[in-house]
């Protein structure tokens, strides 16, 4: 069955470290997204991509980067982790126009 | 400025009754609206959507109503079941020539269905 996976599911890291969260989908969707969920804020968009080599900044992109070298993967990198980046991160994908975004199970990241 | 607002952080409903979750938006460019359901420690799950050319969409126990003039949508769950207890997110996007903009989410409403 086609799906979207995230790894790791849980991660603890130290302030200042570089961290990469993986997102992989097997639906062959062009559109992929990264969100973070924090209490009182709902889901906020970090970065998104509409296809290979395309990346765009979202509402809360500072301190994060993404790259899209193939259709299936959109890794999210925290260049220098900060305690404010402790959050639950969700990856999503969608096939295109007027289609829902389908979410992965999430990665809980703790920055100490 | 919040473009999608869910003003009720929580809602409690008796099993078998109707649950009504509300959502308001401010961006008049939004023309595609969705509801997601989220259980703890899981990703959001798509529930139902509606485009601006309609004012109602129904899928089993779930119905979404859209009032464009009031910039308001609501999700009705009838009858409510204990398994419906979750956080519900309203989301919206705008259709561009190249495709839809990414979803903008509300902060969510926690629904508790009491047996």
Image: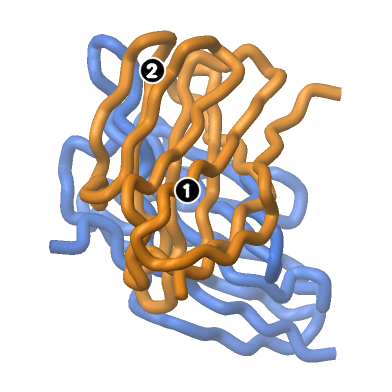
Q: In the shown orientation, is residue A14 left or right of residue A1?
A: left
Q: Chain of mark 1?
A: A
Q: Is residue B27 left or right of residue A6?
A: left
Q: Is residue B68 left or right of residue B86?
A: left
Residue in view at x 18 percent, y 36 percent: B29
Q: Tell me the residue that label 2 is attached to.
A: A50
Q: Mark 2 Cα within 10 Å, few/some/many (few <14, many 20+)?
A: many
Which residue in the structure is indicated by mark 1? A19
Name the secondary structure under disc 1: strand
| Residue drawn at the location 63% of the way across and 12% of the way down | A28
- Please determine if labels 2 and 1 lie on a single subunit: yes
Image location (x, y in percent) of residue A46: 33, 45
Q: Quadrant of residue A103?
A: top right
Residue B20 picture quarter? bottom right
| Element type where label 2 sits in the image | strand
- The relative height of residue B16 versus residue B107 in the rendered view (above or below) is below
Q: Is residue B58 visible?
A: no
Q: In terms of image quadrants, where is residue B85?
A: bottom right
Q: Are the residues flagged by discs 2 and 1 in contact, CB closer than 8 Å?
A: no
Q: Is residue A20 visible?
A: yes
Chain in orange (letter): A
Q: Residue at x 24, y 35 (%)?
A: A57
The label nearer to you, 2 versus 1, is 1
Q: Residue A37's x, y, as percent?
A: 45, 63
In this rendering, the count of numbered labels is: 2
Measure the alpha-carbon separation of dots 2 and 1.
Answer: 23 Å
Which chain identifier belongs to the blue chain? B
């Amino acid at each position: 069955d086609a799906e979207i996976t995230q790894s790791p599911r849980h991660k603890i890291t130290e302030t200042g470290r570089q961290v990469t969260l993986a997102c992989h989908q097997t639906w062959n969707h062009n559109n992929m997204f990264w969100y973070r969920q924090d209490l009182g804020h709902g889901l906020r968009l970090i970065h998104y991509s509409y296809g290979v080599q395309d990346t765009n900044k979202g509402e809360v992109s500072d301190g994060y980067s993404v790259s899209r070298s193939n259709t299936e993967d959109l890794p999210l990198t925290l260049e220098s982790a900060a305690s404010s980046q402790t959050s639950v991160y969700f990856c999503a994908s969608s096939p295109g126009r007027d289609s829902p975004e389908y979410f992965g199970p999430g990665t809980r990241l703790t920055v100490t | 400025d919040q473009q999608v607002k869910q003003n009720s952080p929580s809602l409690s409903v008796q099993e078998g009754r109707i649950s009504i979750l509300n959502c308001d938006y401010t961006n008049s460019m939004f023309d595609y609206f969705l509801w997601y359901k989220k259980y703890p420690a899981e990703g959001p799950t798509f529930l139902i959507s509606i485009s601006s050319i309609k004012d109602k969409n129904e899928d089993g126990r779930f119905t979404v109503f859209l009032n464009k003039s009031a910039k308001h949508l609501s999700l009705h769950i009838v009858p409510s079941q204990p398994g419906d207890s979750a956080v519900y997110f309203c989301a919206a996007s705008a259709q561009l020539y190249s495709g839809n903009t990414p979803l903008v989410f509300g902060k969510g409403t926690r629904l508790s269905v009491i047996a």
